[in-house]
Image: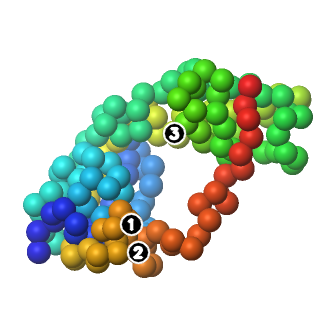
Amino acid sequence: MKIAKNTVVTVEYSLSDAQDNLIEDGQEPMVYLHGGYEGTLPKIEEALDGKEVGYREVLHVEPEDAFGDYDAELVKMEERSNLPTPIEVGMQFEGTPEENDDGDAIIFTVTDVVEDKVVLDGNHPLAGIALRFNLHVVEVRVATDEEIAHGHVHGGFGHDDDADEDDEYRSYPLH
């Protein structure tokens, strides 16, 4: 079966930077609904479209086609008293910076805690990095009607419709 719109694709992968430094070894395969449902990067979908089980490719993706360029304006200094305790590096919070006129929330990661200040970074951890995906297609199947209607894969690798997506991050207004 060829990869096409409304197929579920299972891909074994590893991810490295342009210098071939391993970022993620892909111990679990990536499983996504093919066809513009935003289950993976558009460049990966483009590269795999029309391919079959067994297909392998090393795909180089520039930052603008992956997680965007690094934006220094998304790094914020917040008063420690405005955030929960204990606070530690690596914690994530959902917030809306004042400069963000469209009201879209951004996930901020705590990158440093110094005395009464906390440094929050709204960039994706891979922003500004050219990436190299080593891809191997291991399964292709027709998506179910329910998966197509919901726009994502269900089951062991997919989205759990009963899960509360908001549990992953805590929401705080950021100044």
Per the image, the residue denoted by label 2 is: 154
The mark nearer the N terminus, 1 or 3, is: 3
Of the two numbered discs 3 and 2 in the rendering, the one whose residue sits closer to the viewer: 2
Find disc 3 in the rendering and name its residue.
124
Q: CA distance from mark 1 to mark 3?
A: 25 Å
Q: Quadrant of the N terminus?
A: bottom left
Distance from disc 2 to disc 1, alpha carbons, whole Å, reads 9 Å
x 43%, y 70%: residue: 158
Q: Position of residue 32 (x, y in %)?
A: 33, 64
The image's mark for residue 150 is 1
Image point 41% across, 38% down: which residue? 67
Name the amino acid type tagged 3. His
Return the disc, 3 or 2, that comes first in the chain's sequence.
3
Out of 61 and 95, give the one closest to the viewer: 95
Looking at the image, residue 99 sits to the left or right of residue 6; the answer is right
Q: Hey, what amino acid is under mark 2?
A: His
Residue under the point 59% across and 39% down? 105
Kindly indicate the quadrant of the structure image that contains residue 72: top right
- Are discs 2 and 1 less than 8 Å apart at CB? yes
Question: Can you give x and y, in whole percent of width and height, for residue 45 in the image?
Answer: 23, 53
* 15 sits left or right of 102 in the view: left
